[in-house]
Image (spheres, grey):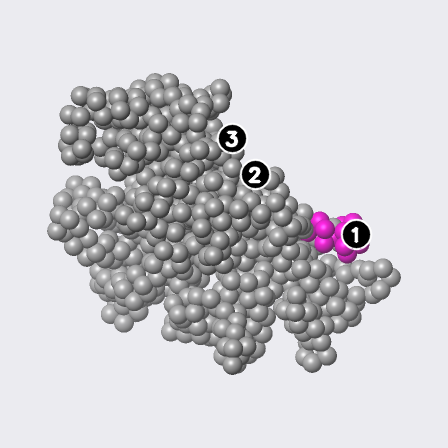
């Protein structure tokens, strides 16, 4: 609870310290993507390379509703959530037919399929040029045109979603996901319908990713094709691992660091992904718990001292 | 309670289980013995639903369960333990057992409740842990337990699912003699409350515990009867007991 | 007939042979050795770029074809020895993640060394020109590619199916401890198979260079398609990878004629269909 309070405080105060509300909003939407990914990897033990698929589905769906129907923002986000959940449930149901590496490959391949579909389906997605002219309506009579206002709106939504994730992790359902992660066969043998749990977890992860996509569409009033491409999926994986998959806080931390670094380093040295790759490989080899586990170790040591 | 009819499982041309008819009666401790490769574990996998038979049928509580998978059979009350310790390694001992107890609640898709709110699940888990003398380890990770305790945990998980029939696959395998004795005592007490099918290599022990014995060899039932009948059976003596040098 | 359709189909086979080479390597490494090497596409890209360097410095394409698989395979073996074996105990997930980091490194290193712009080399002089086909002509080099790829695929297949070592490899995969007992160094055999797998990808990269040139992202694009190929063919099945590769290449070609917009999506739709109808793949037996 205290950790959540600290998170709320940081999110609330961030725009006062750093005056880049767009960047900070992007941290939040990307953070939500990493948290959604981590529900699958950290809790259930499934490495999904297809998270951008759900993000893109949500972003395009929300943007279309905003453009074509001039829908209210909450409604558009809800549409994004549903689009993400349905896409994820469908892809998840196919991907879990195979075990281990096979399933990972399938999420990867379906992401590529989604990318090409978005690329070709110009009427809906704008293809290569992206989907521009997405309106950002106000909410309850309050204009969200100002970037800081939109930041706080996003912050509210993302924090609520994050709290929901914490709640799900602590639920009987979350416990079963961890059982599946630890020993799928045993979970089946004691009477759990593993398939249903997995598909449900995918749907939840997809819903969160779709929500992030919708918020992103509102942020830049634009959905680029990158929203659904494999590089975005890869970035989500990298960010979450960097932060640590042991906790949703870790995923959020990783997303924040990744977003800030990729924005600032790209100005300093254009070949920064090289360093990122090296750091990432080192994390995988030597610090599998990610930054969050290091932070936890420090705080434990501090508590003992 | 459990009955098989001409149960057969072929792997390629080889029939690991070949036309087996057994009946497990309520309240018995029914041991299945036989040399290595006799098809005992395959038979178990057919009973618990891990494998589908090539031919034949399995009936449980008067119901044909041949087409039901392991999950469904577990939900119907067939609990099994595994030959190799099969627990949730990076979860605590308590979580291991609580997860098993939770399968019977219908609350496993509750996203919005806290798992700690399921008071009767926790109470049941604690009761089972206490019964197995594991309550002191409740906050340890299952992987940190000693081998003997892991086997006990394995049994505790199976029991926490509230089965009516227990399938125990060589529960004492890999244990020190002392741990094995402790475990067997435990099984003896369980036999007062559950119907148990037991695969076990330690024949003297089986003779002491079991009320009925089925001897398997080459995938078939060689003999069936009480321990005394089995001991006196000449076919069993030549095929199995004799080679093992049991008194 | 103007020959255009024939050219398209032939192009489909050319592309299919590239897929077959890459997927054959993938199925050896993923399916038989159980090493999830997501950097397979990066080795393919490296194959193209190393070939580019050899050709542009020596002018000898044949040398490139011979050298590239060896150089890149050596690199692959280094990665295997340094990281993949160490990570085997941590599990597949971490092996995948490590190779993901490798993809980032390789892709950016390519940009750093060879630049972000596409590179290209000329078709070797001996293979210039084309075969007349109706109103158009089909380049000799592409026919050469098909034959060369088929030869290599065939040699590896014979080595797997018809030699003592192939039998050991397949036995080793079923039961490593058993083969260890017989007194054969399984680890060394696995290393050789890993090298062959990487070498096949690198060779594919070198062969495609005179046609498509090299782009830093070429490996990533290929990776997803190769996954579809091995899923369709059956993960772990060599024959499946080859047939799947040609099938996917032809599917793309046919779709390009019929309905170009869906030519990429069609591959993955086929993959989804295979998962639903025959999850073990067309030639898989699991």
Report if residue B53 is visible in the image.
yes
Task: Please determine whether, in this image, residue C234 is positioned above or below residue A135.
Answer: above
Q: Position of residue A265 (x, y in %)?
A: 53, 77
Name which residue lies at 80% across and 54% down: A72
Q: Position of residue B117 (x, y in %)?
A: 65, 50
Residue sitting nearer the eye, B247 or B224: B247
Q: What is the magenta segment's predominant secondary structure?
A: helix
Image position of A37 (left or right of C1): right
Residue placed under numbered mark 2 in the picture: B104
Q: Is residue A302 magenta?
A: no
Image position of B95 (left or right of C112): right
Of the numbered discs 2 and 3, the one sitting upstream in the chain is 3
Task: Please determine whether, in this image, residue B167 is positioned above or below residue C197.
Answer: above
Q: Is residue A70 magenta?
A: yes
Pointer 1 local density, CA inside 10 Å: few below 14, some 14–19, many at least 20:
some
- Secondary structure under tag 1 reads loop
Name which residue lies at 40% across and 58% down: B144
Chain bearing mark 3:
B
Q: Nearer the viewer, mark 1 or mark 3?
A: 3
Image position of B217 (left or right of B142): left
**Are callouts 2 and 3 both on one chain?**
yes
Q: Position of residue B154 (x, y in %)?
A: 41, 45
Tell me the CA gap for discs 2 and 1.
44 Å
Q: Residue furthest right?
A: A141
Quadrant housing residue C92: bottom left
Check if mark 2's residue and mark 1's residue have beta carbons within 8 Å.
Answer: no
Chain bearing mark 2:
B
Residue placed under numbered mark 1 in the picture: A71
Chain bearing mark 1:
A
Query: What segment carries the magenta color?
Result: A67-80
């Amino acid at each position: 609870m205290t950790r959540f309070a600290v998170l709320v405080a940081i999110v609330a105060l961030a725009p006062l310290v750093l005056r880049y509300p767009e960047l900070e909003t992007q941290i939040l939407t990307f953070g939500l993507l990493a948290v959604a990914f981590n529900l699958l990897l950290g809790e259930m033990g499934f490495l999904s390379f297809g998270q951008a698929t759900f993000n893109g589905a949500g972003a395009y769906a929300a943007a279309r509703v905003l453009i074509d129907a001039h829908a209210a923002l909450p409604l558009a986000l809800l549409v994004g959530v549903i689009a993400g959940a349905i896409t994820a449930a469908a892809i998840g149901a196919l991907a879990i037919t195979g075990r281990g590496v096979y399933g990972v490959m399938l999420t990867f391949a379906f992401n590529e399929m989604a990318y090409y579909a978005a690329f070709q389906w110009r009427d809906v997605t704008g293809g290569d040029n992206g989907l521009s002219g997405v309106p950002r309506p106000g909410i309850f009579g309050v204009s969200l045109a100002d970037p800081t206002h939109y930041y706080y709106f996003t912050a509210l939504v993302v924090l609520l979603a994050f709290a929901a994730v914490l709640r799900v992790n602590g639920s009987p359902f979350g416990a079963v996901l961890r059982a599946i992660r630890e020993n799928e066969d045993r979970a089946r043998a004691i009477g759990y319908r593993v398939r249903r749990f997995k598909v449900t977890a995918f749907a939840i992860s997809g819903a969160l990713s779709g929500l992030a996509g919708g918020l992103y569409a509102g942020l830049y009033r634009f959905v680029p094709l990158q929203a659904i491409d494999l590089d975005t999926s890869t970035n989500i994986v990298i960010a979450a691992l960097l932060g640590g998959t042991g906790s949703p806080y870790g995923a959020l931390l990783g997303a924040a660091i990744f977003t800030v670094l990729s924005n600032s380093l790209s100005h300093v040295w254009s070949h920064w992904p090289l360093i990122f790759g090296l750091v990432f490989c080192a994390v995988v080899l030597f610090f599998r718990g990610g930054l969050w586990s290091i932070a936890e170790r420090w705080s434990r040591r501090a508590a003992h001292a | 309670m459990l009955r098989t009819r001409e149960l057969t499982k072929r792997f390629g041309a080889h029939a690991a289980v070949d036309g087996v008819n057994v009946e497990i009666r309520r309240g018995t401790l029914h041991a299945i013995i036989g040399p290595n490769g006799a098809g005992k574990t395959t038979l178990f996998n057919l009973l618990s639903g891990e494998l589908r038979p090539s031919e034949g049928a399995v009936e449980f509580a008067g119901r044909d369960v041949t087409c039901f998978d392991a999950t469904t059979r577990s939900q119907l009350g067939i609990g099994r333990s595994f030959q190799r310790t099969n627990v949730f390694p990076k979860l605590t001992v308590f979580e291991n057992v609580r997860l098993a107890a939770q399968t019977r609640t219908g609350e496993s898709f509750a996203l919005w409740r806290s798992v700690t709110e399921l008071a009767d699940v926790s109470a049941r888990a604690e009761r089972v842990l206490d019964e197995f003398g594991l309550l002191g380890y409740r906050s340890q990770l299952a992987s940190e337990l000693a081998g003997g305790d892991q086997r006990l945990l394995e049994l505790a998980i199976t029991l926490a699912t509230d089965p009516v029939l227990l399938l125990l696959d060589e529960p004492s395998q890999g244990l020190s003699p002392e741990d094995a004795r402790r475990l067997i005592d435990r099984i003896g007490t369980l036999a007062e409350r559950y119907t148990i099918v037991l695969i076990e290599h330690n024949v003297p022990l089986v003779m002491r515990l079991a009320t009925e014995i089925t001897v398997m060899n080459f995938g078939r039932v060689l003999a069936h009867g009480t321990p005394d009948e089995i001991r006196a059976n000449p076919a069993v003596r030549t095929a199995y007991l004799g080679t093992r040098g049991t008194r | 007939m103007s020959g255009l359709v024939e050219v398209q189909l032939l192009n489909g086979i050319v592309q299919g042979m590239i897929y077959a080479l890459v997927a054959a390597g993938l199925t050896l490494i993923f399916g038989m050795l159980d090493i999830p090497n997501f950097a397979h596409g990066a080795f393919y890209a490296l194959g193209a770029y190393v070939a580019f360097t050899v050709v542009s410095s020596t002018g000898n394409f044949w040398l490139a074809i011979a050298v590239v698989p060896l150089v890149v395979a050596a690199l692959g073996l280094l990665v295997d020895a340094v990281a993949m074996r160490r990570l085997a105990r941590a599990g597949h997930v971490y092996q995948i993640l490590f190779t993901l980091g490798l993809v980032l490194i390789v892709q950016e290193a390519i940009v750093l060394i060879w630049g972000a712009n596409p590179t290209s080399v000329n078709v070797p002089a001996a293979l210039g020109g084309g075969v007349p086909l109706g109103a158009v002509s089909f380049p000799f080099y592409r026919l050469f590619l098909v034959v060369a790829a088929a030869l290599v695929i065939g040699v590896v297949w014979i080595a797997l199916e018809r030699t003592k070592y192939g039998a050991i490899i397949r036995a080793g995969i079923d039961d490593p401890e058993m083969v260890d007992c017989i007194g054969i160094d399984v680890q060394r055999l696995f290393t050789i198979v890993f090298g062959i797998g990487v070498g096949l990808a690198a060779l594919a990269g070198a062969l495609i260079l005179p046609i498509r040139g090299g782009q830093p992202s070429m490996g990533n694009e290929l990776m997803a398609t190769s996954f579809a190929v091995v899923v369709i063919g059956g993960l772990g099945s060599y024959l499946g990878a080859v047939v799947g590769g040609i099938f996917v290449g032809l599917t793309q070609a046919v779709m390009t004629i019929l309905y170009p917009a869906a030519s990429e999506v069609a591959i993955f739709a086929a993959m989804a269909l295979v998962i639903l109808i025959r999850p073990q793949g067309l030639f898989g037996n699991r």
